[in-house]
Image (spheres, rainbow, N blue to C red):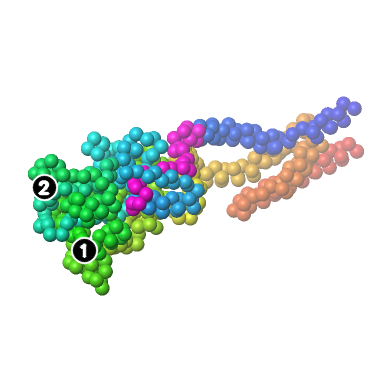
Amino acid sequence: MMKSKARSDSKHQTPPVLQQIRDHQREAFRTLGPAGAITLIGFIITFFFIEPAPPDVIRIATGPSDGNYYRSGLAYADFLKTKGIELQIQETAGSEENFNLLIHDKGTNLAIVQGGAVPKDVNPESFESIASLYLEPVWIFYRPGLELGRLGDFSGLTISIGRDGSGTQKLAKFLFAENGVSPNSGGTEFVNLGPRDSISKLKSGDIDALVLVLSPEAQLIRDLLYSSEVSLFSFDRNQAYSKRYGFLEAVTLERGVIDLEKDIPSEAINLVAPYANLIATPSFHDALIPLLLDAATISHFSGGLLADAGEFPSLVGSEFNNSEIAREYIEHGPSLFQRHLNFWVASLIDRAKIMLIPLIALLFPLIKLAPPIYRWRIRSRIYRWYAFLNSLDQKLRDKDSWDLEKYQAQLAQMEAELAELEVPLSYMQEFYDLHIHVDLIKRRLEAFNQEQLALNK
């Protein structure tokens, strides 16, 4: 009875080979577990360095609602809306107010500003340039009959230089000052009027000249060019201005370019044109820069009277350092992710790149170790059975301790497990050698069994 119970218990015991496999798995876990834990810790640490997701609402300071900056903002907003971003357009008096908002209003970190309108107390490191968008010439219209060859000749006149807070006013003061013209000197008077009021007073004779900074496509400019009541000043030294001041470009309004039939203008007019710049504060989310450049490209790529197609958006003409992300986009185009993936998905992947650092650090040694580990694991599937076969072979020499039924059962279980074992073709020789040795031990067990039966008779 006790013998039968012992045999029953032996059948439920875990075979030695399976126990070895489980031991091996535990050992593998002990070996790879710390590596996995280190990798997990690395992921957790790097997670805190990932830039937060871009906001879905941003605000841009533009200019008056009848100006080109405001219209550009509206065009950008329409494009960004298709990407799930709301761009709020903030109407302002102009570039001076835009800078004030960027500095003091935390909700505004994006603006379109005019070249030459940077306040004196602004640190150049306070902003970065995303792109220059287009050129807006300085137009100086004056009463016909005045002899005005250079800006210095405007001394003693009454000049409208734009409304308070506008980039036009700041640039006009700068250009006149560079030519020795300032208010209250020699009878010169500067008045601060908007474009329409300035035109009205110029035509009525209340002022002698006005300064506008507008696109040549603007209707106000077209109307003035067709008017016989005003004359347009030509900057004969426009190349000198361009060389001296990086935010100005020398341009020429060619004869007849506005109207060939009526020959408007009737002669080529030399002008200076500041760049309209899209700038941002350092807190502006980098992921939004390519989207803004997409919008700017759609709006300004075609060029116009003063720029060739593809000239804008550009990196030239800025008074601030260019954003590296903007530089990469303008020089090489959008990234692979940005071209083929949804904006939010591409942004997530781009921000998660830092998570690859611990993974790569772990993968390099693992890649080197993988081939020998793979070979060892495949061969170990085969060779670990030899320990069991060797123990049976050794016990054949010790007949007193030989438990025939126990080892026959374990050998049968071994054969069943071998039948389910999957081995790559390149290791089949070792696998079939193992089968041969199993058969050898099996025959010896059967021979031993026959010998025992013969002795019992």
Given residues 297 and 334, the one toward you in this image is: 297
Question: Which range of residues does the magenta coloring cover?
Answer: 42-68
The answer for how far apart the CA atoms under marks 2 and 1 are is 24 Å
Residue at 34 percent across and 34 percent down: it is 104
Which quadrant would the C terminus be assigned to in this image? Answer: top right
User: Which numbered dot is residue 156?
Assistant: 2
**Is residue 159 left or right of 166 when viewed as pictured?**
left
Q: Secondary structure at mark 1?
A: loop
Q: Are marks 2 and 1 in contact (CB under 8 Å)?
A: no
Question: Residue 390: within the magenta?
Answer: no
Which quadrant would the N terminus be assigned to in this image? Answer: top right
User: Which numbered dot is residue 228?
Assistant: 1
Residue 299 position in % (x across, y down): 38, 57
Question: Residue 57: within the magenta?
Answer: yes
Residue 378 position in % (x across, y down): 60, 45
Residue at 43 percent across and 42 percent down: it is 58
Q: Nearer the N terminus, badge 2 or badge 1?
A: 2
Residue at 59 percent across and 34 percent down: it is 29
Residue at 59 percent across and 35 percent down: it is 28
